[in-house]
Image (cartoon, rainbow, N blue to C red):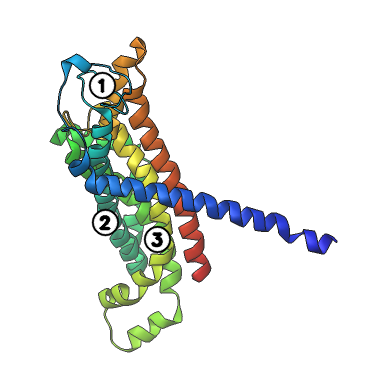
């Protein structure tokens, strides 16, 4: 009897995990669709002001209500989805290219170059990322793309450190010696063998990291260093809606804040499942 009952909790767990993954993936698909078509299907323009509808509650004309300028929250959330997600994707792409290049180079060359790059990444890794970003913005000026570039530089050491640990074990595998025996150069071996073999572990790691990247970019916009008005980037929308809280108008802050939180949670759920599957295949 014990043998027959033992598998059942694991089956329910797999089903529960599968449903959670499907719900999270479906939600992310809807957000991606909103980001792609939002500017074309939004019922109102991004900066369309209606002083007669300031702080209006949900209605047929404004399903999620309006903000302090009478702008439709539903339209701004739809349009802002693209700006929020695209900024995070570009940020992560820049950080990944730089981080993977540094990590693989350090592992491949070894010696003093590995030591120097390791010390640099350790210093950057230990330095508070937000403070580093604020320093970069202080020099080059605030704005969405300044924030994206600054954050990509802050996240690159994190990715480099993870990539180096993977690359060290990969470079020790026998096929590397076979490539060297064929006369292939280091760059060719890394591009043809090392980096492709690191992708399964890297992809799962980066998907999970995307949630943190999105939160960091939204935080900068909330603090006024990232996207600037009249942008509807979700972090900026949270900041702009704050004055309404003391007057009892919670939706202008709650709606974009909930959107950020739900996307981060969904990305983490999907990222963990993707990482598990890729590791199982590896």
Q: Name the element at disc 1.
A: loop
Most foreground residue, 280 or 121: 280
What residue is pinned by disc 2? 98
Residue designated by label 1:
67
Q: Secondary structure at mark 2?
A: helix
Residue 207 location, x and y as percent? 39, 53
Distance, label 1 to label 2, CA atoms, is 39 Å
- Where does the image place residue 117, in percent across and percent down from the top left? 32, 56
- The image quadrant of residue 77 is top left
Marks 3/1: CA–CA distance: 40 Å
Residue 32 is situated, as x and y percent measured from the top left of the image, at 31, 49
Residue at x 29% of width, y 21% of height: 241
Q: Nearer the viewer, residue 93 or 138?
A: 93
Residue at disc 3, secondary structure: helix
Q: In front: mark 1 or mark 2?
A: 1
Q: Earlier in the sequence, mark 3 or mark 2?
A: 2
Label 3: which residue? 202
Give the quadrant of residue 118: bottom left
Instruction: Identify the residue at image location x=23%, y=16%.
Output: 54
* Along the viewing direction, whichever of 45 and 222 lies nearer the viewer: 45
Camera-near label (3 vs 1) is: 1
């Amino acid at each position: 009897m014990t043998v027959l009952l033992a598998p059942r909790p694991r089956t329910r767990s797999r089903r529960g995990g599968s449903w959670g993954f499907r719900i999270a993936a479906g939600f992310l698909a809807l957000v991606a669709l909103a980001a792609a078509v939002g500017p074309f299907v939004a019922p109102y323009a991004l900066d369309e002001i209606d002083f007669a509808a300031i702080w209006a509650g949900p209605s047929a004309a404004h399903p999620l209500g309006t903000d302090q300028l009478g702008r439709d929250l539903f339209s701004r959330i739809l349009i802002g989805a693209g700006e929020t997600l695209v900024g995070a994707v570009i940020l992560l792409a820049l950080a990944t290219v730089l981080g993977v290049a540094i990590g693989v180079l350090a592992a491949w060359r070894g010696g003093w170059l590995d030591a120097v790059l390791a010390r640099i990444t350790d210093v950057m890794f230990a330095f508070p990322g937000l403070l580093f970003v604020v320093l970069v913005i202080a020099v080059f000026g605030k704005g969405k793309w300044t924030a994206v570039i600054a954050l990509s530089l802050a996240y690159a050491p994190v990715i480099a450190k993870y990539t180096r640990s993977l690359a060290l074990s990969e470079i020790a595998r026998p096929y590397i010696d076979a490539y060297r025996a064929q006369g292939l150069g280091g760059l060719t071996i890394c591009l043809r063998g090392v980096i492709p073999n690191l992708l399964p572990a890297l992809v799962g790691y980066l998907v999970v990291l995307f949630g943190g990247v999105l939160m960091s970019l939204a935080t900068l916009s909330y603090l006024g260093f990232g996207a600037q008005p009249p942008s509807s980037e979700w972090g900026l929308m949270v900041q702009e809606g704050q004055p309404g809280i003391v007057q009892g108008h919670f939706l202008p802050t709650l709606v974009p804040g909930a959107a950020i939180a739900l996307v981060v949670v969904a990305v983490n759920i999907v990222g963990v499942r993707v990482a598990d599957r890729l590791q199982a295949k590896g």
